[in-house]
């Protein structure tokens, strides 16, 4: 945990650590498919994915992996001393490797930049979501937050 704009600025260029591992379940993938309307067979048809997928079974949606960031990032970083914060978006988002259902993922984060914005600061965090046992990350993205004093 750090306090205020100066505390956040002190993190620039630093790797901030890792979250706990989280298992990705088929139920979670199915619920995400229902919420988004993305029922592509590689995600939700377990038997077909086992037969036809190059991954040997179903995989999580890339955007499901991205949607885990609000769960995982608070385990890595807490910045106090602000009235409120908002998710401002993401940049340079890539999904280099699949997340097989049943695998475990965790996030790591590095503070890339802290800049002044009207009423507060903007923090740019490079977040990498790793799949346990995989050489390539499942997600690499710059996540942008604005925090207001």
Image (cartoon, rainbow, N blue to C red):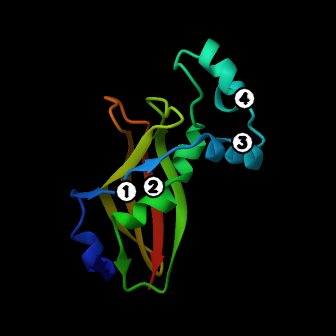
Neighbours of disc 1 within 10 Å: few (<14), some (14-19), many (20+)? many
Label 3: element kind: helix
Alpha-carbon span between mark 4 and mark 2: 27 Å
Q: In this view of the protein, which residue sits in the foreground, 20 or 85? A: 20
Q: Nearer the viewer, mark 4 or mark 2?
A: 4
Q: Position of residue 59 (x, y in %)?
A: 57, 31
Question: Does residue 44 appear left or right of residue 95 in this picture?
Answer: right
Alpha-carbon span between mark 2 and mark 1: 5 Å
Q: Which mark is residue 33?
A: 3
Q: Earlier in the sequence, mark 2 or mark 1?
A: 1
Q: Earlier in the sequence, mark 4 or mark 1?
A: 4
Look at mark 2 in the image and give the residue it sits on: 143
Look at mark 1 in the image and give the residue it sits on: 125
* Quarter location, residue 123: bottom left
Q: Earlier in the sequence, mark 4 or mark 3?
A: 3
Look at mark 4 in the image and give the residue it sits on: 40
Alpha-carbon span between mark 3 and mark 2: 23 Å
Whether residue 104 is situated above or below residue 147 in the rendered picture? above
Q: Earlier in the sequence, mark 4 or mark 2?
A: 4
The residue sitting at 24% across, 66% down in the picture is 11
């Amino acid at each position: 945990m750090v306090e205020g704009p100066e505390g956040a600025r002190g993190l620039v260029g630093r790797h901030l650590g890792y979250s706990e591992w989280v298992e990705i379940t088929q139920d979670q993938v199915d619920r995400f498919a229902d919420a988004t309307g993305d029922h592509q067979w590689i995600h939700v048809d377990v038997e077909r994915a086992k037969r036809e997928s190059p991954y040997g079974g179903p995989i999580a949606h890339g955007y499901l992996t991205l949607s885990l960031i609000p769960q995982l990032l608070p385990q890595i970083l807490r910045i106090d001393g602000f009235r409120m914060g908002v998710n401002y978006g993401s940049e340079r988002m890539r999904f280099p490797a699949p997340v097989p259902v049943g695998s475990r993922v965790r996030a790591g984060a590095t503070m890339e930049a802290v800049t002044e914005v009207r009423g507060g600061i903007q923090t740019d965090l490079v977040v990498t979501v790793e799949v346990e046992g995989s050489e390539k990350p499942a997600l690499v993205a710059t996540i942008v937050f604005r925090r207001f004093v």
